[in-house]
Amino acid sequence: MRYIPVVLTRNVQATAHRTVALINALTGDDPAAVAEVLRAHGESDPVTLSATDITEMRAAAQQLREVFTAADTDLAAAALNRLLGRSPGALRLTAHGGSTPWHPHLDSDDDAPWGEWFLASSCLALTVLLWDRQRPPGGVCASHSCRNVFLTQGSGPERRYCSRRCATRERVAAHRRSR
């Protein structure tokens, strides 16, 4: 059974952070890294992922990446609407047989395959973020050596990099090129 603990079920931002971490982990070839992300975001051991699970999750990550590459709110909403339109389940509430607080699901069943669960829960979280903020929920790192996605954080200047590390690396590279 897949569920997220109480702390995370009430926090769309935490689910969106899990989405970003999984999309970024799924760009690599390490199933253990994907399992570690799932554990870090509330999954209990054992987290067993088959090759098929990883393939389906990677396909979901590719589809979700379209939301992060959207140039504006309308394009992000259109991408989310396409993904939501393909959802195998209707919006429903579940408490996983009483083991968790009530929370929404879009997948077909509480024991849906990992890829289906990942895509559905991610779409739901990203939809709420777009609705709440009226802007795309995130972006893709502008660093030439990084393709990670990231969430936009509150107000302030538009974010271009996934981390301070990437921003610093790009500033140093630009400085070296200018010399």
Image (spheres, helix red, strand yellow):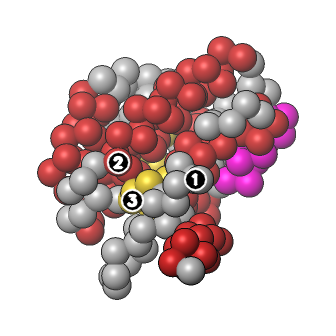
State which region is magenta: 35-47
Question: What mark, if any, has residue 146 been given in the picture?
Answer: 1
Question: Disc 1 vs disc 2: which is toward the camera?
Answer: 1
The residue depicted at 55 percent of the width and 72 percent of the height is 177
For the C terminus, which image quadrant? bottom right
Q: Which residue lies furthest to the bottom in this view?
A: 156
Vertical placement of residue 13 versus 48, above or below: below
Q: Mark 2 points at which residue?
A: 69
For badge 1, the amino acid type reads Cys
Question: Disc 3 vs disc 2: which is toward the camera?
Answer: 2
Vertical placement of residue 108 versus 117, above or below: above
Q: Distance between the residues labelled 3 and 1?
A: 15 Å
Please tell me whether residue 94 belongs to the stretch shown in magenta. Answer: no
Question: What mark, if any, has residue 138 been given in the picture?
Answer: 3
For the N terminus, which image quadrant? top right
Q: How far apart are marks 3 and 2 (CA)?
A: 8 Å
Place of residue 80 in the rendered image (x, y in percent of width and height, measured from the top left): 28, 41
Mark 2 crowd level (few <14, some 14–19, many ≥20, 10 Å Cα): some
The residue depicted at 57 percent of the width and 28 percent of the height is 57
